[in-house]
Amino acid sequence: MKKTLAVLFLYMRVKAKGKYEYRAAFWLDALSFLFGYGAQTLLMVLLTQKFDTINGWTPFEVMLLYAYTLASYTLANALLSDVMWSLSRRIRTGDFDQTLTKPMKPLTYEIVTGFSPYYFLHFFLALGMVAIGVTQLHVTVTPLTILQIACGILGGACVQGGVLLLFASASFFWINNPLTGNFYTNIRPLIEYPISVYPKFFQVLLTTLIPLAFVSFYPVQQISGRQDFGLFPPVVRHLSLPVGIAFLLIAYAVFAAASKHYKSTGS
Amino acid sequence: MIEVAHVSKSFKIYKNTKDSKHKLRSLFAREYEIKRAVDDVSFTVGDGELVGYVGPNGAGKSTTIKMLSGILTPTAGEILVDGRIPYEQRQENAKHIGVVFGQRSQLYWDLPMTDTFRLHRRMYEIPEETYKRNVDLFIEVLQMGSFLNQPVRQLSLGQKMRANIAIALLHDPEIVFLDEPTIGLDIVAKSRIRDFVKEINRRKGTTFLLTTHDMDDIEQICGRLMLINHGRLGYDGSLAEFQARYGDPYRLYVTLQPGERPQHPHLQLLGAQEGRFTLGGSKAELPIGEAVSYLSTHYSVRDLRIEESSLESILKAMY
């Protein structure tokens, strides 16, 4: 672990240096972040002003759903976005060979070399939204509340990370993997709204097989006090972290097994 | 030591077809065939050996290297690299081997290679003293001082290859696999890399297994040759023995006085043009020295050139 962190921090410094080599790209990246998330924040503010409730959820509760989803998304993507987006290409070109000749576990190496610290900018924006949501909902902030928020976001990060890892694993079987790229980006918005608006079948799916409901829908209710669990018992609002960790471990096992199917390419 | 025992590697290849009906059917049920890239190969490489591993395109060279380095798992057979099973103990094996794929780079594109060196040092936990000693050695032998701090994207192919080889050796691996390391390089760059490999082998006793299509690489670096074709090992022995066994034929290009025509029962006339003759012979039947002596004695030789079978011509005939 010590070695992994040392390599990770050095990679971050080296990659940052690489970014500074191309000044125009650096500033454009910064501007696109400002515009992109500025627009999303504005949209969220407008939503809270335009709608009274969504299936009984108040605008600031919906804002918390968005903020939890974004915060956990950024944590997961800081580590795994490159794995999901680039693994298919690296397998197709045979560049994954290099990963397998390094003295690190393949996934560790992919995470370290693909680590993207810029997602932390998005993370702080999300935390800001959490703070606004909590304040507007008049939640009493205690050490327990902070711990619950942290566990909720961390658990959500584990779930989203697990989904990214499962999608990436398919690259070892489907060289041109359709599950990467925009696929996850398109399904993620589903959990930015209360899942109780969806049919029961979908709520069960998002609680069991692909536990995305534990990213925001259940952990937010731990803070807001809302009681909207559908078919499931109230205890689900406390289970984000254990469910997230379990799901991530399953996803890792799938990745490790799938990587044994790697066939490389010709020379 | 590398021990390879009855190793085979097969791949399932989907059958491609131009027939549009079959293409449509393949969306639902695909047909495939099994391709045996490596077929029952066995060999042992001792510590400190310099081994050339040659064969035509698609022979199974790179597949073999990938199994030895742990990238691929054999379909059958066993491999041990210094007592380790490379595809099962991949992380541990990686600490003791170096791999250079001639057509792929390990360098960080936008930054000087010193940054990649530093990353490798941290990843392989190379002690400071070893790191410094190796970097100094590589700069000296590979003459990298002039471009050490340039961004990699600005380096020539030869410079990048030298840097890639240096990185593969930074952690003092006992065994190095070089997969076509001189591909696309000019003769000066090739010469530098060959000298470097021999120097590292001499200084550190590093074992090198080299795949290449450049026969000069083999002749200048390797003492031992392994030939693979259609996945099967055709030859495994010393380079000298290979040339003696298969390098029997030779040619003599001789220019004689007008009116003369060379004849010998063991020399075949392959071509004649205005007093210039091409003669083919076999060392087993008539050694080159005797052939030259015969021609000099019986004819007025104005010019003579001897062409022995080169490694390239022997291999070309075998492929």
Image: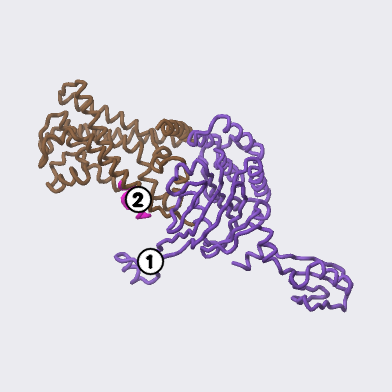
Q: Residue at x 16, y 21 (%)?
A: A140
Q: Are marks 1 and 2 in contact (CB under 8 Å)?
A: no
Q: Left of B284 or right of it: where is A126? A: left
Q: Position of residue A87 (x, y in %)?
A: 39, 47
Q: Which chain is purple?
A: B
- To the question of a shared chain for discs 1 and 2, the answer is no
Q: Left of A78 or right of it: where is A145? A: left
Q: Residues within 10 Å of mark 1 (few under 14, many from 20)?
A: few
Is residue A67 shown above or below B233?
above
Q: Residues within 10 Å of mark 2 (few under 14, many from 20)?
A: some
Q: Amino acid at mark 1?
A: Tyr
Q: Position of residue A147 (x, y in %)?
A: 23, 26
Dot 1: chain letter: B
Q: Position of residue A175 (x, y in %)?
A: 38, 54
Q: Quadrant of the N terminus of chain A?
A: top left
Q: Which chain is brown?
A: A
Q: Which residues are magenta?
A: A166-179
| Mark 1 vs mark 2, CA separation in Å | 21 Å
Residue bearing mark 2 = A258
Residue bearing mark 1 = B32
Q: Residue at x 40, y 62 (%)?
A: B12
Q: Position of residue A251 (x, y in %)?
A: 29, 44
Q: Is residue A174 magenta?
A: yes
Identify the element where label 2 is drawn: helix
